[in-house]
Image: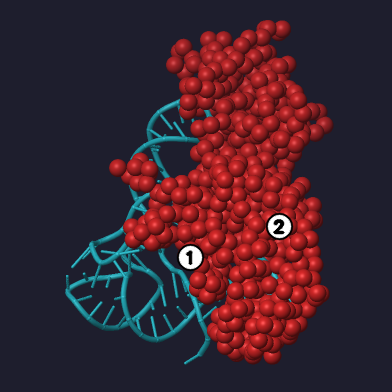
Amino acid sequence: MSKKEKGEKPSNFIRNIIIEDIKSNRHGGKVITRFPPEPNGYLHIGHAKSIVMNFGFALEFNGRCHLRFDDTNPTKEEQEYVDAIKEDVHWLGYDWGEHLYYASDYFDKFYEYAEKLIIMDKAFVCDLSPEEIRAYRGTLTEPGKESPYRNRTVEENLDLFRRMRAGEFKDGERVLRAKIDMAAGNLNMRDPVVYRIMHVPHHRTGDKWCIYPMYDFAHCLSDSIEGITHSLCSLEFEDHRPLYDWFLDQLQVECHPQQIEFARLNLTYTILSKRKLIRLVEEGVVAGWDDPRMPTISGMRRRGIPPAAIRNFCERIGVAKKESVVDVALLEHCIREELNRAAPRVMGVLDPVKVVIENYPEGVEEELEAINNPEDPSFGIRNVPFSREIFIERSDFMEDPPKKFFRLAPGREVRLRYAYFIKCTGVIKDQETGEIKEIRCTYDPATRGGDSPDGRKVRGTIHWVSASHAFHAKVRLYDRLFDHPYPDRAAKNGGSFMDFLNPNSLKTMGSCMLEPSLKDAQPGKVYQFERMGYFCVDKHDSTSGSPVFNRTVTLRDTWAKIEKRFRQQQGQKSRKKRRRNRK
RNA sequence: UGGGGCGUCGUCAAGCGGUAAGACACGGGUCUUUGGAACCCGCAUUCGCAGGUUCGAAUCCUGCCGCCCCAGCCA
């Protein structure tokens, strides 16, 4: 039996550590994790990796996972973000139950620990300016110098720190620093700042505090207070681990969690840095944080991507310490895999051209039976109306088709899905532009439902919609935001990631014709438009009875591949020809 | 001789001294009332490189090479 069949998850180094820890009863056999976002922005697929890991391990080992807001810097944080983050985590399918925490809940405790550090003579109040502190810190290759304030007495430090808290000093005038080692090779250990003065109201504690703890101090203690066993974070915090351990060792806390670092997620054709995503929003490249092209959780939700697809994706990419870039094709695969199971099928013509079936009686209509999901009979069947005039996809007809084109062409017969075989008898074109205005066909009444009694085969089956029954709708075709697989890497040679924006990331189809059952489609619902892709009803722009659809992802398109290869071959041939002619 | 990490298929990624899993991508095929789905086949004689230890090395040792992170009173 394969691992998948047994429900076994693929091995990774963090799971191995946890399994070993349980075996050796290291944390009393418990597994308690946490997802600790700073509420200063929206969550994206990179955060989803962390969420799936933290909540996933908790679920897998019968532990629990906390949601903790790391809100120690009030200048950047807002309630709006905490609300959005909670919504996103829930939407992804996880529940923290009673365990919702805020670092700001612990401000009193942090303060006590800070005084304890001072009393142990392991911290001091420093009057150096930010610039001076930097200068004293030394460089990557040279040791730093000790602050002239490093040898203040415990009493003086305690007094100064209390006055810092009381608001006697201005922002930046003094800081509390840990007393460690100014010659340490790890810069984080060169007497790091522990508390800074900020006369800024906090979104939760208001004006209670004018000093706020730094990440390194607050994070390890938050973890410890909550009894976290495994504190997972990204690679760039590796250098902070000695400090994480130092604080907990000095303060002799009873719970000392283990910090484990893993590589962040990177995706091809995508950027995930908050700073850059902000640019996309602020410069109006996208319509907002929840634009369906954004890699944010809210954007993906609006795009129609099911949470199960994101969860599955995050489990399949694995966890390691190697910095890597995952092919976005894997995400797309996970989306299709989920939607193929879950999305009802429906017919919609995005770029319609009219077909008149000459031998079908005028004024007659009939109902044809269509299957809602061939993957799952429980989806049932529905009726779709048929009549003499229908719309088909403009790209499903070619006047002069290449070899492997199986669709409609003059003299050719195709099947209308769930309906009849039709044969093209001619086209009517616009006199001036030459554009095809109408395709003329005949149908074979004996093929009703799509089977021919005489056993005659057709290569192509195309989708359609009855002209008089269809309704008009707007459909937005989304594609990758960037047309370069590594917009960041490419930008290093002087340019910017903005140079690699895909000009075709959004194409609005304004005159689509959809089957009538879609008229009352509910916002958020995802359908498969047969042969076209998966489309979801937009939550913002749809109105009752007038849905707007977003394309979530296309279907795999073998024909497009054949076509592309064909075109490349043509290109090569003509290039060769030109070369030959030049000689 | 600053400190810390990482190098296994095009991309992720298992592997923990017994002779290179799996997934995506890619290529080929079967089937098909979605050129979808499903199914089948193929896809690393070799693990950054070079030595060494061993009956046996991706796994252990030594030395190179390459890439990433760190000098916020951000997280």
Residue A462 visible somewhere in the drawing: yes
Quadrant (top left, top right, bottom left, bottom right) of the C terminus of chain A: bottom right
- SS under mark 2: loop
Q: Is A565 or A313 nearer to us in this picture?
A: A313
Above or below residue A136? Residue A539 is: above
Chosen colour scheme: by chain
Answer with left or right where residue B41 lies relative to residue A478.
left
Closer to the camera, A535 or A10? A10
Query: Which is nearer the eye, A348 or A246?
Result: A246
Rendering coords of residue A146 (x, y %)? 64, 89
How many other residues sit within 10 Å of disc 2, few (<14), some (14-19) or many (≥20)? many
Q: Residue at x 74, y 83 (%)?
A: A127
Q: Residue A205 in the image: x percent, y percent?
A: 73, 57
Residue type, mark 1 in image: Glu
Where is residue A103? Give x, y as percent: 64, 59
Chain B painted colour: cyan
Total number of numbered discs in the rendering: 2
Chain on which label 1 sits: A
Letter of the chain shown red in the rendering = A
Q: Is residue A337 left or right of residue A3?
A: right
From this view, report whether residue A438 is shown above or below residue A161. Answer: above
Q: Farthest residue to the front: give it.
A: A155
Residue A162's image quarter? Answer: bottom right
Judging by the rendered image, the residue that carries numbered circle 1 is: A254
Q: Which residue in the protein does label 2 denote?
A: A40
Residue A496 in picture, x, y percent from top left: 71, 65
For this rendering, which residue is in front, A205 or A301? A205
Of the residues under marks 1 and 2, which one precedes in the sequence?
2
On the same chain: label 1 and label 2? Answer: yes
